[in-house]
């Protein structure tokens, strides 16, 4: 494929999955399967519903940003482009999300400078909501030493957003950046003004509410999984444990946080008095629903877009 090395992406996802399967053999797999035999089908359906709703929230946020910046693309392609980013989970620091800008450029000729602000704001909104959930958990007594620094980080993020919402600051920043020859070729003016457009209070609140919906539902998946294994955990503690483990995995820069996220989530569940067997099973099942299911759907989305991109390439010859 000329536009996107799809074979390499599939290979990396498959290899990561194999390493993951090999890695979880550290846990008592037979014990996990034994627990799964008695798993409630009703809980399983609720988990699927929570996963579906969480994805709806994230997709609506993507659509909202596209509409806000008046980027025109078909609904079907938007669905495929959104899910394609899940296949890029292995990229460090969530940089795989940039595939959405790549695909918008190749399919609709949307300049990168017009679409990358969407990716940036999505990550900022996620970070704000995750820090909020973690701080909420810290207030309840989890690792209080970290509370101060998380508040400082949250204030810094909100300060940056406030600055970008100020046109005077934006004009000053653009003039300063444009004096540097290296940055002139990137035409950052469009990017900065797009960010300024997205950080307006009303738009920011809408995006944060949608982000909140996603993380609440994703954390609910963990809660339901643990409850399904007859583990004792409150929804509030799940709202802390899941985002915290994702952040720890993200900071590790390991693809998808593989291993680090699982280990931190296992430790957090154990700290709540959940048995090692139930904690192990809960970690594995939660990651299947919140990572691997999306990655597999993402591969099919890329395969579908592959045909569209090849068709466009042939028509341009």
Image: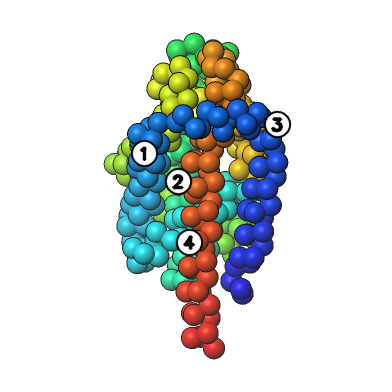
- Residue farthest bottom in this picture: 317
**Residue ID for mark 1:** 45
**Residue ID for mark 2:** 121
- Sequence-earlier tag: 3 or 1: 3
**Residue ID for mark 4:** 301
Are there few (<14), some (14-19), or many (20+) residues within 10 Å of tag 4? many
- Horizontally, is 163 left or right of 284 in the view? left
Q: Which of marks 3 and 4 is in front?
A: 3
- Sequence-earlier tag: 3 or 2: 3
Q: Which of 101 and 47 is in front in this view?
A: 47
Question: Do callouts 2 and 4 mark residues in contact (Cβ within 8 Å)?
Answer: no
Whole-number angstrom distance, CA of label 3 to CA of label 4: 32 Å
Q: Nearer the viewer, mark 3 or mark 2?
A: 3
Residue 288: percent from the left, percent from the top?
Answer: 53, 41
Whole-number angstrom distance, CA of label 2 to CA of label 4: 23 Å
Q: Where residue 26 is drawn, which disc sits there?
A: 3
Q: Considering the numbered disc 1 on the image, is that residue within a helix, a strand or a loop?
A: helix
Q: Quadrant of residue 114?
A: bottom left
């Amino acid at each position: 494929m000329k536009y996107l090395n799809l074979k390499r992406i599939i290979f990396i996802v498959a290899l990561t999955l194999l390493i993951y399967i090999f890695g979880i053999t550290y846990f008592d797999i037979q014990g996990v399967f034994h627990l799964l035999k008695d798993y409630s089908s009703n809980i399983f359906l609720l988990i699927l519903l929570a996963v579906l709703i969480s994805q709806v929230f994230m997709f609506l946020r993507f659509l909202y940003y596209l509409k806000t910046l008046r980027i025109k693309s078909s609904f079907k392609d938007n669905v495929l482009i959104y899910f394609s980013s899940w296949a890029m989970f292995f990229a460090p620091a969530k940089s795989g999300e940039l595939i959405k800008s790549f695909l918008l450029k190749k399919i609709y000729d949307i300049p990168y400078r017009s679409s990358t602000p969407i990716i940036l704001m999505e990550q900022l909104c996620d970070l704000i909501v995750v820090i909020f959930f973690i701080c909420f958990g810290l207030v309840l007594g989890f690792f209080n030493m970290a509370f101060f620094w998380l508040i400082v980080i949250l204030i810094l993020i909100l300060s940056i957003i406030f600055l970008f919402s100020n046109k005077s600051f934006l004009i000053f920043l653009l003039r300063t950046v444009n004096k540097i020859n290296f940055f002139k070729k990137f035409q950052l003016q469009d990017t900065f003004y797009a960010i300024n457009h997205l950080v307006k209070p009303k738009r920011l609140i809408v995006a944060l509410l949608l982000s909140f919906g996603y993380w609440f539902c994703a954390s609910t998946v963990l809660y339901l999984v643990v409850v399904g294994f007859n583990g004792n955990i409150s929804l509030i503690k799940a709202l802390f444990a899941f985002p915290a483990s994702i952040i720890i995995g993200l900071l590790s820069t390991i693809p998808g946080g593989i291993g680090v996220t699982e280990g931190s989530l296992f430790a957090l569940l154990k700290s709540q008095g959940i048995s090692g067997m139930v904690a192990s099973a809960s970690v594995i099942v939660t990651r299947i629903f919140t990572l691997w299911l999306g990655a597999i759907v993402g591969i099919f989305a890329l395969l579908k877009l592959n045909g569209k991109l090849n068709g466009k390439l042939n028509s341009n010859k």
